[in-house]
Image (cartoon, rainbow, N blue to C red):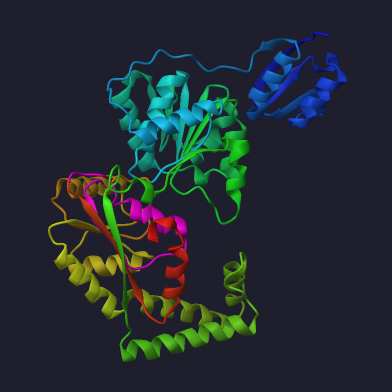
Amino acid sequence: MSVAVGLDFDRGTLVVEGDDALPEADREALARLGFVADPRAGGRLRAPASTYRRALAHLVRAGHEVADRARAYEELTLHSRRSRDPYPHQRDALEAWWRLGKRGVVVLPTGAGKSYVAELAIARVARSTLIVSPTIDLMNQWLALLSAAFDKELVGAIGGGTYEPRPLTVTTYDSCYLHMDRLGASYGLLIFDECHHLPGASYAQGAECAIAPFRLGLTATPERTDGGHERYDALIGPIAFRREIQELAGEYLADYEVVRLRVELSEAERRAYDAARAEYRGFVDANQIRMASPDGWGRFLQLTSRSAWGRRAWHAWREQRRIALQCDAKLLTLEELLVAHREEQVVIFTADNDTVHRIARRYLIPAITHETPARERQELLEAFHEGAIRAVATSRVLNEGVDLPTASVGVVLGGSSSVREHVQRLGRILRKREGKAATLYEVVTGDTGEEHSSDRRRDHGAYR
């Protein structure tokens, strides 16, 4: 029996009008998609807006007359201002995504041209599009890319104090979460840059509150330690295409070498390190804290705030970490590497701002941290691109999203045990240029907790 029903977008949800006339089998099918009766709407069926594509497809296949009032996105006529043949991996990625119904995640290393895959997808889908990025810096990069590729009048932004939604709009994950309850019907294609950020509880709501039938995720490192990557299928689509660094190095990425350098503490540093480590470990062991467990760090912080012993343990943890990160041998090794690569562009990665500032003062190297004002950061990166600055030191703000095409040497002086962080740092120096060979140095302090972290973060095919 054919029934006339309506679909409406309401504050990030999809509401079925006239559902009470639907056969029971269709109501059960909608329930399996996530629809529930909402007593606040007279018992009408309601579900997250992201069910739009499947709900509409089911109702149409069942032969019902559907008044689609939810859809507010536009069909666009797009004329690309630049035309170049995609690399084989870019073309294959686009086609794999298209075959999956224009839904899914494309996994490509940094420097392999993920943004051009997105540009091709926008042109081919030709629907109003929202690109979601993790930072304001990346949002501005996307604005520049879209303005160069398409009519600038079509390009807008939401975030960083700007609210200009247009057919091709760039935003941040934070702004997407805040505004999608109003704008969730306005875009047919969602592109999630660095989509490994999306499965977080708040950010995922931005995807759930949008009707967009077409979705593309971009990342070099899809896996999450909390298992959140298992939500890609529901939020974006399955992994459609994947290539790793070692598969593209040499032809589409720069040839590279990874070198681990082990340095030793001085006698005085060793005594101080061992004393601080013993104080810290004694507290951890006495309180049966498993630091490797998901809640280990949080429990340690909680307990250290409750007693004088705990506060001593906290300071001891910081001191043993500082010694391992900033020991004299590590800084002398950095100095030797800077001399050896004085004609190349070098990025120095550390685990904390204190080490960054110490390097900056000692070697007169510009520092870029989360505290660096946006304009100053932009000026420093432009000077680096132009060769006026040969080296920059950073903690973690350059790990992802920032384009450093001229960098050919990376020096890791400290970081977390995260595989993602290490792969992203390697990716910063792999942008292909004629004659370029890249080298990533990892300087590790021997017989400290750094060695364990180094072993864990190197668990990736790019380092084998």
Find residue 337 and report its horizontal and vertical position in percent.
Answer: 20, 68
Q: Is residue 420 magenta?
A: yes
Task: Please state the extent of the stretch shown in magenta in the rendering.
Answer: 405-434
Q: Quadrant of residue 339?
A: bottom left
Q: Nearer the viewer, residue 437 or 56?
A: 437
Q: Quadrant of the N terminus?
A: top right
Find residue 194 and report its horizontal and vertical position in percent.
Answer: 45, 43
Residue drawn at point x = 61 percent, y = 64 percent:
294
Residue drawn at point x = 70 percent, y = 22 percent:
55
Q: Quadrant of the C terminus?
A: bottom left
Q: Quadrant of residue 54?
A: top right
Q: Nearer the viewer, residue 271 or 346?
A: 346
Q: Is 238 left, or right, of 394 in this rendering? A: right
Q: Is residue 255 magenta?
A: no
Q: Is 352 left, or right, of 205 in this rendering? A: left
Let me know if residue 43 appears in the view.
no
Which residue is the extreme one toward the right? 24
Where 25 falls versus 409 (above or below)? Answer: above
Q: Is 146 left, or right, of 62 in this rendering? A: left
Residue drawn at point x = 45 percent, y = 89 percent:
275
